[in-house]
Image: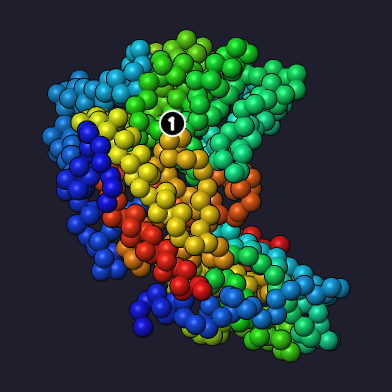
Amino acid sequence: VAVTAEARLDARKLRADFPIFEREIHGKPLAYLDSAASSQKPRQVLEAMREFYETSYANIHRGVYDLGERATEAYEGAREKTRAFVNAESTREIVFTHNVTAALNLVAYAWGLDNLGPGDVALVTEMEHHSNFVPWQYIARRTGADLVAIPVDPEQGELVLDDLDTLLAGRTLKVLAVTYVSNSLGTVNLLERLIGWAHERGAIAVVDAAQAAPHRAVDVQALGCDFLGFTGHKMCGPTGIGVLWGRRELLERMSPFELGGHMIRKVTLEETTWNELPHKFEAGTAPIAEAVGLGAAIDYVEDVGLDVIERHERELLDYGLPRLAEVPGLRLFGPPADRRAGIVSFEVEGVHPHDVAQILDWEGVAVRAGHHCNQPLMGRLGVPATTRASFYVYTLPEEIDRLVEGLHKVRTTFA
Amino acid sequence: MSEMESLYREVILDHYKNPRGHGVIEGADVEAEGMNPLCGDEVSIFVSFDGERIDDVKFRGRGCAISQAATSMLMEMVKGKDAAEVATMSRDELLDEVGIPLTPIRLKCALLGLGVLKLALHKAKGTPLPDEWAGLAEDLELK
């Protein structure tokens, strides 16, 4: 297997951290190629959460007793780790949410409702996950703004950036909402250029980093965006915890989103004033242990090294894309390896993706089949659904071999 | 026979590759369609009647092998039967014919065609949609 590089990630060694790989699927070792949907969890994260529950658990921010203070310290410690993880200026800019969908809805509602109106454009792309598409479509409808989508070139699997101003047709660009990495195609978008263009027109830029943060170093200051969301469960962390980073001056000016406990400063019968950042956006009991788990996940991926993870996935692509291209009747979507993350979507001629995934499952190979919450993109590609394989720190080149062998079996079954 | 071989047994693949009753009836008495939003399976069914009897029935659609093969089998099962008889046909009758073990997700694929057909009969002849089908109709976006 021709995968070599200097600072290599030892996926075989890392796999020992993930208990899930101790079990077999249909009598075969698990080849988990669905990390873009959700990653598996290392012991370090599971143990951090268990230890927190067993030794330090209480509700946060209000308890004056020892446990309450410990729990608050753990939760706020996770916030500091998250701040450093995306190189934000201040922990006040780090809002914990339940997932990236909640983070993007927060921006669409709390910023969008007050800042969009007739004649304005909310600009998304045809490759947005529904979580960065549907909220903007809905809020645009509510406010009278227009939703416009940057097209995708179906052959290249990349955004068409040639004539962005034409898309605006004289209207005012207010917000650009764009994904860092496409969850279907793996395309890594040229964010700096897009964000620069949006800022020149006075718009804000919202980045969906759900498929980026687990796989490459994300630096909000270098990107120059205004909001960025990501989620814990795709990066070795638990479900139920997501992150919104927002530029402080924007967050300060915004109305709250969810209302209730903790997000208030003072409540009277007549009126309520809001808590300071980031608490203004964290109503109700927070996902406390999940934040602790996210902190442990950040430690884990940083120990491995984000640049090492990125290189590992690039090597898997360099190995896997040509191997997959050898399968007769297979149509690969998306850009070449140097412009994509570890995600490969494809179509097997004459076989529905669910049948592909079902046959692969019996080989112990877990892939996703469907529209991947990308229905506008599927329309552009001219397919109802695709089969998608995605990689992470524990992915081995042999698993790509097993995927390829399984695809030959699919072809034989349907021949 | 392994689990996989039984699911994709020859008769299923044969119906998938050479669907029976595939096509459109021009001037059909009734047409209904449905989709399984989970998988994106789509089926449209066209029926023409001779009195109460199903004189001809055809379908078109796209989707997984299970959904398309089960609908193809259904076309063979119901042609020439009375609408009222088909309207009360149990799902097990079709599933026995399909004859493969199905997980809950794939069960919906297999039953899509039957749901669409019962809806077509309901539209044309006012046959009742049994309770269990009323629930499925919501799942399958029948119209």
Hey, what amino acid is under mark 1?
A: Ala
Residue at figure coordinates x 81%, y 83% from the top left: B49
Residue A302 seen anywhere in this rendered image of the structure: yes
Q: Quadrant of residue A118?
A: top right
Q: Is residue A207 above or below residue A248?
A: below
Quadrant placement of the N terminus of chain B? bottom left
In the image, taking residue B13 as reference, residue B18 lies left or right, namely right
- In the picture provided, is A221 more to the left or to the right than B115? left
* Residue B91 placement: quadrant: bottom right
Looking at the rendered structure, the number of numbered marks drawn on it comes to: 1
Above/below status of A261 relative to A52: above
Q: Which residue is mark 1?
A: A209
Q: Nearer the viewer, residue A248 or A354?
A: A354
Q: Chain of mark 1?
A: A
Secondary structure beneath label 1: loop
Q: Position of residue A207 (x, y in %)?
A: 49, 27
What colour scheme was applied to this rendering of the protein? rainbow
Residue B11: x percent and y percent?
53, 83
Residue occupying the point 70% across, 70% down: B60
Q: Quadrant of residue A100?
A: top left
**Farthest top residue?**
A249
